[in-house]
Image (spheres, rainbow, N blue to C red):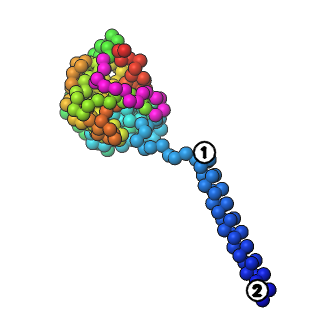
Amino acid sequence: MASRRTKSVACFFNRDYLIRTLFCGLLLCLFSACSSNNYAPISNLERPKTVTKGTYVVRSGDTLFSIAWRYGRDYRELAKANGIRWPYTIFAGQSISLSKRPASSQVTKQQTQLEKKPQQKQTMQLKPQPVMAKGPVVWSWPVKGTIIAKFSSTANKGIDIKARKGLPVKAAAAGTVVYAGSGLVGYGNLVIIKHSETFLSAYAHNKKILVSENKKVKAGEKIAEIGSSGANETKLHFEIRKNGKPVNPLWYLPK
């Protein structure tokens, strides 16, 4: 009888020891996880960084300007690397090299595609390239509202302005619309305007786009309406890019 009692007590303590050991191990595991440097992945809606490798296959609705914007590149750089001349016509299914060096195969492919479209090729030759103003770009605010997110070279490549839904979005400077669509993930309904050979500006998350590509706009002209497309709140995301690189809009907008 004493032997059985001793075994029962031993089993009890062994079981108690096992439970305590498992509990301590669980606590240690949880503590390690909390103190680990393995942070959660960055949201896939973050604006992509500059890409200088690989290729991009053109989709319907793309323009050379929107592709350059998507990968943080200067449109002239992409045009040169791919043998694309003004007015920078591209075709769905065409491969665009993202390398900074001219790719002979891409140039040959572009020439072949143009040869298949003799009328378009002739139009490109006859249509003169517009002369952009050489003077400085005069900037104005695209909308009246409250800045809710400032420029950051790593997280936010522009500024976010909170404003009432439906309010007019205005061109921040005179220029030509080079993209109007919703093909860039994270931007919603987007308008990109070319102001000079150096500067482009973008207006994202619009409710409605009121201009089309190749339209010339004046400073202060209504181009869209405030909305929340591609975003979780009503706002305007506004960017300025200089030679393809994002710059802080607050450096250029009036105080």
Q: Residue 4, which numbered label?
A: 2
Q: Quadrant of the N terminus?
A: bottom right
In front here: 165 or 140? Answer: 165
Q: Which residue is depicted at the point 38% across and 30% down?
A: 148
Query: Residue 130's x, y, as percent?
Result: 26, 19
The nearer-to-camera label among 1 and 2 is: 2
User: Could you say which quadrant of the image residue 126 lies in?
Assistant: top left
Residue 149 falls within the magenta-colored stretch:
yes
Residue 225 % position (x, y): 23, 31
Q: Which residue lies furthest to the bottom in this view?
A: 1
| Residue for badge 1 | 37
Q: Is residue 85 visible?
A: no
Crowd rating for badge 2 (residues with CA inside 10 Å; few <14, some 14–19, many 20+): few
Q: In which quarter of the image is residue 43?
A: top left
Front-lying residue, 189 or 33 = 33
Q: What residue type is labelled 1?
A: Asn
Does the image show residue 248? Answer: yes
Range of the magenta residues? Answer: 140-155
Image x and y of residue 13, in percent:
73, 73
